Image (cartoon, grey):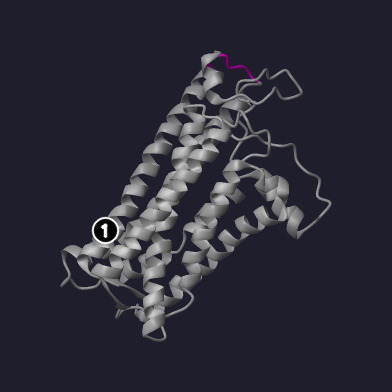
Amino acid sequence: MGIATEVYVAIVSCVLSSIGSFLIILLNLRFSDYRSNFFRKLIWVLSSYDFLLTVLFFFPQSNKNSCKFQSYALVFAGSMAPNFSFCIAIITYLNISKNYPIWKLAKISIYLHAVSFCASLGIMIFSLFTAQVGPYPETYWCFIHGRLAKGFYYGTIWISCLGSTIMYLLIVKKITQVSRAIERMMNVEDAKKRREVLQSQIRMSIIPLSLIITWFFPSIRRGREIFSPDSKEIPWLNILQSLTNPLQGFLDCIVFVFCSKYSRDKLYELFCCKEWKKSSPMKVIGLSHDKKTPLLISAEEFMSNSSQKEADPVISLSESINNN
């Protein structure tokens, strides 16, 4: 397994990630009702950073100036994606667990986006003054060199990954409370609601898992370079890094598009049949102030009367638990 294998694997991964990010961006641009959902707008922004990251991998360095541009751009885009994922995790937690209204979350999201942007910009500027740039001998791409800059870069990324994991564990805990509340009044008709809760737990677990998958092998590889710079390269580790590092856009597409029936219907409408019959709208967990279509799954019906044919007004998970 040589340099060609690593490059080919990275390009395949970049193609998948670019397609995934592009689908999310395209759905938001094409359908006004789709992007009217507050949480989908956040995923739209995240997909834009994922798309920027993967596009940079398609242009191997050709001269000194392009090498510098690619190195610093990869530092910015590579840290911005997990940082903004952490922001989304915080906002989701505030919405589901703390019952924050959408208008307040919109203001908070602006500040969090600014903080994550400045953090990534700060990492890039820090690398500009403390690290050298150049192509890696085992690849065709350029990146920063230097133990201090790499430690700062990957340390920030793993803080974001750890924070995202904690937030989503708290979200799953909240969903579990709803699940137990349903079990206490379980009957045959409520069994479907129970399954929906379990599905939401699985989907919530995928989000931080995608971050860990994306950055696990790159962190091991660069960690060896930081703490043991004279160690011998491990070919299979290099291949795994090339496979997973650009893959976040594809994983996000799996979670937010292919795991959402509403998004799948929109894709079918976009590519297959413009007159596709719209499915019944699904509601986002905790979106008590946004009756638009969903991000993940239906939560409106979790605690509603199963005998009603029409869905009750949207209520938050917190209200559902407190009322039962």
Q: Nearer the viewer, residue 214 or 22?
A: 22
Residue 6: % across, % down: 39, 75
Question: Exactly how many numbered labels are in the figure?
Answer: 1
Region rendered in magenta: 182-188
Query: Magenta segment: does it hold 295?
Result: no
Describe residue 158's horizontal placement relative to residue 208 as left or right: left
The residue that appears at 50% across and 55% down in the rendered structure is 251
Q: Is residue 258 above or below residue 192?
A: below
Tell me: 267 left or right of 195: right
Quadrant of the image containing the C terminus: top right
Task: Please determine whether, in this image, residue 72 is positioned above or below residue 28.
Answer: below
Q: What residue is rendered at 40% in x and 37% in y?
A: 167
Residue 127 in view of the camera? yes
Asked if 252 appears above or below 167 in the picture, the reply is below
**Would you name the residue on which mark 1 appears?**
152
Whether residue 259 is visible: no
Residue 146 in percent (x, y) is at 22, 69
Q: Indicate the quadrant containing the N terminus: top left, top right, bottom left or bottom right.
A: bottom left
Residue 274: x %, y % from top left: 81, 55
- Drawn side of residue 320 relative to residue 3, left or right: right
On the image, the x and y values in percent for residue 75 come to: 37, 65
Measuring 54% from the left and 69% from the top, which residue is drawn there? 15
Q: Residues within 10 Å of mark 1 (few under 14, many from 20)?
A: few
Give the residue type at disc 1: Phe
Residue located farthest toward the right when viewing the structure as drawn: 275
Q: Quadrant of residue 69?
A: bottom left
User: In the structure shown, which secondary structural element does the residue marked by tag 1 occupy?
Assistant: helix
**208 or 96: nearer the eye?**
96
Question: Could you say which quadrant of the image residue 128 lies in?
Answer: bottom left
The residue at 52%/39% (across/down) is 107
